[in-house]
Structure formats: structure tokens, C-alpha cells
Amino acid sequence: MNPHVKEARLTLALAFPIIIGQVSQMLMGVTDSVMIGRLGTVPLAASAFASGVFSVFFVIGIGLLLPVAVLASREHGAGNDSAGAVWLKHGVVLAVLASVACLGLMLGMSMGFDFIGQPPEVVAAAKPFYALIAVSLLPALVFQAFRQFAEALGRPWVPMAIMLGCVVLNAVLNWIFIHGHLGAPALGLAGAGWATLVSRVVSLVVIIAWMSRADSFRAAWPTTWLRQLSATRFLEMLRIGVPAAFMLMFEVGAFIMAALMMGWLGANALAAHQIALSCAGFMFMFPLGLSMAVGMRVGKAVGEGRTDRLRSIVFGALVMSCVVMSVSATGFAFGGTTLAAGFVKDSETIALAAQLLVVAAIFQLFDGAQVIGSGALRGLTDVRVPAAISFVAYWLLAIPGGYALGLHTSLGAVGIWIGLAAGLAIASVLLIARFVRLTKRGQQVTY
């Protein structure tokens, strides 16, 4: 069997439940958008604004916690799961500390929302929802630490099921709290915030209950949680996690900056941006899941001393990503209006969202390639150069280009997305080139 095909099959076997889990997380956002969209354009725009700010801090936390998966998978590849348990313990503590710090920053930032040029009615509607999802950051990040550890040890199915259950619970609670069913008060947009907070707490409780009782984690479960913490291990995690967090922040921050620029164009532009981003983000979950699996498999291969498999692992995943993203690009290009109409009834917003989805169709392939490349490099614990690549691609090229095209030409919202597409294309080329160089035959690289 062709080695690329063999490795692609192994990657997909690990990635499939991770992808479903990622899709379930995206479905939570899509469900919120659809249910909030029924309240009108202003609540939808408010949720887009609040969720955008939240996502910056969420991805920072995700980046800081990525070493849990990378280092635990390396220990697993070396047959030392008890050492991996130490990384889980440090990851959980790091998740709590990062959550508390980010929560303080998020609540402090909310006092300045009135001064960043957003429509006043959008800011007023966003504040209660924003406060609730800010609090939900703590259970969300701690859950990610446990989830990544389980996946690194080859147990992705139960976390997937928990995340799917979380989506269902969130939808039910949305129905209850947004519209006031089953005797509950109709809280509107704030009700969606309560639904998110409750569902994330429940998912954390369930994954801890499962992992603490499962026989497969007996050797990989910490005997203590607050004793024997090591500053050296925290520094090792931060050495990988901080650049990874910056890399994710640069990319997601670019989309958040795009959302702010959309707000300068009006509530309709911001709502259309949220619709198109929800659709593009939903399909992005496939290459993102592949990327997470690639990072773990690359780390495991390094732990096993099988560096000859690295290129086959990564290139097999790239082919799968390109196939799926080509299909989604076709759907966005020809079915954008139908997709947008499922979110909101406003005809102007639907038309603009359909135009943005045409641009999304163009950057789908690049988006998939760049996330596979970044996952492969994380598996090699190569994070500093990729972080610099992301900064250049998104903040020196994509955002200035989007600003110039969107606010100083007749392209408007479409111009902002063209700038984002250019940044994704540049990032994908440079990240894949970086991986190819590091894995050049005969070259000695310290992973």
C-alpha cells in the first residue's frame, strides 16, 4: 500500500471523532446564530460581536493548552503514559490560571465597548450575553485540557459524544431561556448566554467523571493534582504554548478585526459576516480535526523514533483536506443565498452574506492547507517561526489589505474578506514550505 494512503487512513481513524467533536462545537455556535437570528438583526450582530471578542481569549487558552496533546502523545509513543499524566495535571492547572486571567481582562474590556465605533444598539444588546460567555471560559478551557489528553492517548470517541451531547443540551436550553418556555422567563439574547454557560459546565463534569473511572486511564491519571507541581514543566508548556497561542490569536484576531471593520459598515454587514463566518467555520472543522490528529501522530512518531513517517502523515492529510474543501467551496459558490436564508430573513443581509460566501469558496483550500501545516509543525514543537509567519500574513498583509479594499473602495464588506483570503493563501504556502524544509531527507533537526 502507498505509504501516503496508509498514513491517511490511520490519520482519518484518529481524526474522525475529533472532527465530529469539532463540528459539534461549531454547531453550538451555528445553533446560537440561527436561534438568535429569529430575534432580529441587532441581536444577531450583538452575538457576533460578543462571540468574536470571546473567541480571541478562547483561542489563546487553546494555544496555551496545545502542549498537553503534543507532549502527552510523545510520552504515549515512548510507552510512558504515567509521565503523560504529569502533563495533564500541569495542563489543568494552567487552564484554570489562564481562564481566571482572561476572565478579568474580558470583563475589564467590556467597560470600553462604547468607545470602539460599534452601533450603540449592538453594544447595549451584547453586554449581558458577553458577561455570561466570559464566565463560561473556565469550564470550556479545563474541558479542553482533559479532552486533548484523552485524544493523545487514542481515546477520542467519548469526548466526541460528550461534545455532541453538549450541543443538544445547549439547543434545548436556548429554546427554554431565549423564548421563555417551560415556565422560564424569556431572556432573549442573555438566555443564549445562560445556555452556553450551563452546557459547558455539564460537559466538564461528565468528562472528568468518565476519565477518573475508566480503566484505560488508570496508569495515566494523576495521583495528586496540586502537589509536586514543577516550574520546569510549566516553562516547557509555555515554551510551546505561548507561540502557539500567538499564532492562533493572529489568525482569529484577524477575523475579529474584520468583524470590527464590518461594524463600521453597519449592523447588516456585521450580521452577514457572522453568517458567512459560521458557514466557513463549520467546514473548517474537517481540516482542523485533521490538523489536531496530525499534530498528535507527528508527536507520537517522534516519540517512537519513526521520523521517516512524518511526510507521509502530513501529505496524506493535505490530500484529504483539499478534497473536502473543494466540495465545500463549490457549495458556497453556488448555494450561498440558500445557506444565508437559513439564518435570517432580512434580504439585504442575505444578499451580502451570499457575496461573502463566494470569497469564502476561494480561500477554502488555502484555509485547509494552512491549518494542516501548523498542526504538523506543532507536532515537531516548531512554533516560533510559524507564529511569525501568521503575524506577517494576517496583520501585515490581510488586515491592511482588507481595510484598504473594504473601507476605501466600493467593495465594502467583500473587500475585507478578500484581504482575509490573501492572508490565508500566504500563510498556507509558507507553513507547508517550513514543514518540507524541516523534514528534508538527511537533515538533522532537533524536535
Image (spheres, helix red, strand yellow):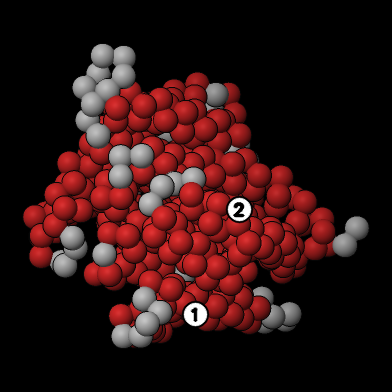
The residue at the far front in this view is 347
- In the orientation shown, which residue stands out farthest toward the top? 183
Please name the residue that numbered disc 2 is placed on: 286
Tell which tag, 2 or 1, sits nearer the viewer: 1
Task: Give the amino acid type for the residue marked by disc 2 in the picture.
Answer: Phe
187 vs 353, left or right, is left
- Tell me, yes or no, whether the two marked residues, 2 and 1, touch with CB atoms within 8 Å: no
The answer to which of 44 and 427 lies nearer the viewer is: 44
Image height check: is 124 above or below 376? above
Q: Where residue 352 is drawn, which disc sits there?
A: none
Assign the C terminus to one quadrant of the image: bottom right
Residue for point 69% across, 80% down: 440
Residue 155 in the image, given as x and y percentages of width and height: 60, 36
Picture residue at 27% right of the left edge, 42% below the top: 133
- Residue at the disc numbered 1: 422
- How crowded pointer 1 is (Cα within 10 Å; few <14, some 14-19, many 20+) is rated as many
Q: Quadrant of residue 369?
A: bottom right
Above or below residue 106? Residue 226 is: above
